[in-house]
């Protein structure tokens, strides 16, 4: 049974973040933070109880930004602390590194990624920047020595060393290629950090890269299907309408318990699936697909791996599941807000 935990859900349609307490089989909504325009990503500093939320521009006088909020673990209340303006466009992914003293971000609309220092919850001037088409996510290694930026538009993973001064230096050529037109989107590292797994949006695959622990370099090793072949989806493409075209629309990826499975979401079929991971790290095709919230852009697994919470862009609820291997049992659906698209444990 899971311990009581806080769960945060971003609701882009309502410009809110819901704060829930998870206790076993039940979700209790404690608080709703409002006024976070179009928020669709956030990162949590659990040691300092700070939340960094990406918001879209509300007007020319109020551009896109990353808003820092304090989190009260007793009440769930989120209180704005500071605001870091993003005049070049909102970010689609935020990650923290160096024990919460540095922030990484990727901008899909602005085609840029950045790293910046943090002092007492206040984001400082960026110290490093990269430019790739339609950057969708970024993730650091746990030791804070490397950062990986995923470019959906250029079909690659940017690989960079992160210096003591928070500057970015290319590793090797600076990029690891993904299959042409696959649309790499989100990524995870395994606990040994000798492998990186990427979910693609247009081909609906899990890409497995071997990672060199010393240099941080990546090499594509294997790939597996994460889309239901019975659904009859066509391959997605940049600028296409996945709903009208009945196209592949892959989204999120997270490890399950003991890293035996990689859970993935696909929005055209509104399904979740678990791709088996072999002992050598090779990933295998998803064998069964589980219906979930409409257009599941984001989901998360509990630290113990025994609970999964999924959000849907076309739903006002989140679904809470018990996890048993590659199977899910629905426990509850809880009201959250419109356009729910990002979920994290705090």
Image (cartoon, rainbow, N blue to C red):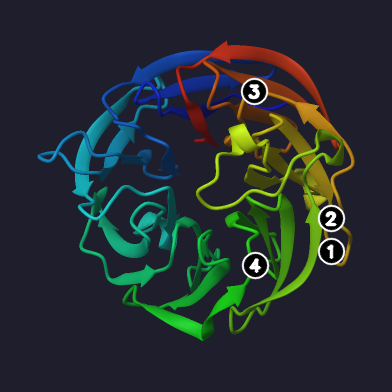
Q: Where in the figure is residue 172, as x and y percent of width and height?
A: 54, 87
Looking at the image, is mark 1 or mark 4 earlier in the sequence? 4
Tell me the SS state at disc 4. Answer: loop
Query: Is disc 2 in contact with disc 3, using a CB cutoff of under 8 Å?
Result: no
**Left or right: 238 in relation to 281:** left
Name the residue that disc number 3 marks. 293
Crowding near the residue tagged with mark 3, few <14, some 14–19, many ≥20 C-alpha atoms within 10 Å: many
Q: Few, some or many C-alpha atoms within 10 Å of disc 4 (few <14, some 14-19, many ≥20)?
A: few
Residue corresponding to mark 4: 180
The numbered mark, 3 or 1, whose residue comes first in the sequence reads: 1
Q: Are the residues tagged 1 and 4 within 8 Å (C-beta)?
A: no
Q: Which of marks 2 and 4 is in front?
A: 4
Numbered disc 1: secondary structure = loop
Which comes before the other along the chain, label 2 or label 4? 4
Contact between labelled residues 1 and 3, with CB atoms less than 8 Å apart: no
3D distance between C-alphas at marks 1 and 4: 21 Å
Q: Nearer the viewer, residue 198 or 189?
A: 198
Report how far apart the C-alphas of labels 4 and 3 lie in the structure.
30 Å
Name which residue lies at 64% across and 37% down.
245
């Amino acid at each position: 049974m899971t311990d009581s935990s806080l769960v945060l859900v971003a609701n882009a349609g309502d410009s809110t973040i819901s704060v829930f307490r998870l206790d076993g089989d039940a979700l209790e909504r404690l608080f709703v933070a409002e006024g976070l325009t179009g928020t669709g990503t956030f990162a949590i500093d659990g040691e300092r109880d700070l939340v960094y939320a990406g918001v879209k521009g509300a007007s020319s006088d109020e551009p896109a930004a990353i808003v820092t909020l304090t989190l009260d673990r007793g009440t769930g209340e989120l209180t704005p602390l500071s605001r870091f303006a993003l005049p070049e466009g909102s970010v689609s992914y935020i990650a923290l590194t160096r024990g919460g003293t540095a922030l990484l971000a990727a901008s899909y609309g602005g085609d840029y990624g950045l790293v910046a220092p943090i002092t007492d919850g206040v984001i400082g001037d960026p110290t490093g920047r990269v430019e790739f088409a339609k950057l969708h996510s970024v993730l650091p290694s746990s030791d804070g020595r490397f950062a990986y930026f995923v470019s959906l538009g250029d079909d690659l993973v940017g690989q960079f060393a992160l210096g003591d001064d928070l500057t970015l230096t290319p590793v090797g050529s600076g990029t690891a290629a993904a299959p042409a037109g696959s649309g790499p989107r989100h990524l995870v590292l395994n606990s040994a950090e000798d492998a990186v797994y990427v979910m693609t949006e247009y081909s609906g695959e899990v890409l497995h890269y071997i990672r060199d622990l010393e240099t941080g370099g990546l090499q594509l090793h294997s790939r597996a299907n994460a889309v239901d072949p019975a659904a009859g989806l066509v391959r997605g493409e940049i600028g296409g309408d996945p709903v009208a075209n009945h196209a592949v629309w892959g989204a999120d990826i997270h490890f399950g318990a003991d890293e035996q499975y990689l859970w993935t979401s696909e929005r055209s079929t509104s399904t979740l699936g678990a791709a088996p991971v072999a002992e050598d790290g090779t990933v295998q095709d998803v064998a069964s697909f589980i219906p979930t919230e409409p257009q599941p852009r984001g989901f998360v697994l509990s630290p113990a791996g025994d609970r999964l919470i999924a959000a849907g862009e076309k739903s006002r609820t989140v679904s809470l599941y018990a996890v048993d291997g590659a199977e899910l049992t629905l426990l509850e659906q809880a009201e959250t807000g419109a356009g729910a698209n990002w979920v994290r444990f705090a």
